[in-house]
């Protein structure tokens, strides 16, 4: 079979079809190889060796005024130490006699508490509240910067 000339093709368009092995190699080098290099550089994140898993925990609403919008916490699992905790910002003293007045005026004193995750989860399950966990897709360096080492937590 003979190769088509540019006069045989519709609209005088010159089609490139590499038939020889050296032409195929040249085609790959010019058009495909640069894309592979760019893709490999974009995948150049280092391996995650942090042993940390960080998740956003979203808890469903309850009937109390302070809980009708739900709640969120951050879960951290450190597989190297066995730590599994919930960082819970929004801890407060609801035995304060002016609790609801302060809450509705937005002048509550909130604190960060760190609880064993299973204890945290059990509390919400007892109240029949939903708990949804969303794993954050962070690389090892981002996890290490976000969460202090377990020796600093306790």
Image: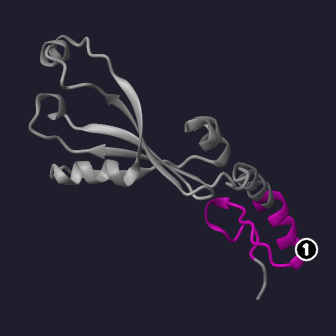
- Secondary structure, mark 1, is helix
Residue located farthest toward the left when viewing the structure as drawn? 63
How is the structure coloured here? one colour
Res 60 → quadrant:
top left
77 vs 126, left or right, is: right
Q: Quadrant of the N terminus?
A: bottom right
Using the rendered image of the protein, determine whether residue 149 is visible from the camera's viewpoint. Answer: no
Residue 154 x/y as whole percent: 55, 39
Residue 122 x/y as whole percent: 27, 54
At 80% from the left and 66% from the top, the residue drawn is 28
Using the rendered image of the protein, determine whether residue 128 is visible from the camera's viewpoint. Answer: yes
46 vs 55, left or right, is: right
Q: Is residue 82 magenta?
A: no
Q: Which residue is mark 1?
A: 22
At 83% from the left and 58% from the top, the residue drawn is 30
Q: How many marks?
A: 1
Residue 10 x/y as whole percent: 61, 66
Res 82 → quadrant:
bottom right
Residue located farthest toward the right when viewing the structure as drawn? 22
Residue 35 x/y as whole percent: 73, 55
Residue in front for this viewpoint, 28 or 123? 123
Q: Is residue 9 magenta?
A: yes
Q: Which residues are magenta?
A: 4-32
101 vs 3, left or right, is: left
Q: How packed is label 1: few (under 14 Cα within 10 Å), some, or many (20 or more)? A: few
């Amino acid at each position: 079979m003979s190769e088509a000339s540019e006069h045989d093709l519709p609209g005088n368009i010159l089609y490139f079809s590499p038939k020889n092995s050296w032409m195929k190699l040249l085609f790959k080098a010019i058009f495909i190889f640069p894309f592979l290099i760019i893709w490999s550089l974009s995948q150049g994140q280092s391996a995650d060796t942090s042993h940390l898993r960080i998740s956003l925990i979203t808890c469903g609403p309850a009937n109390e005024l302070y809980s009708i919008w739900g709640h969120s916490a951050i879960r951290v699992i450190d597989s190297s130490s066995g730590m599994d905790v919930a960082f819970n910002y929004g801890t407060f003293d609801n035995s304060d006699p002016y609790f609801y007045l302060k809450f509705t005026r937005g002048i509550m004193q909130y604190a960060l508490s760190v609880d064993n995750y299973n204890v945290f989860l059990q509390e919400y399950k007892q109240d029949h509240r939903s708990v949804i966990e969303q794993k954050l897709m962070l690389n090892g360096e981002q996890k290490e910067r976000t969460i202090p080492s377990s020796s600093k937590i306790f």
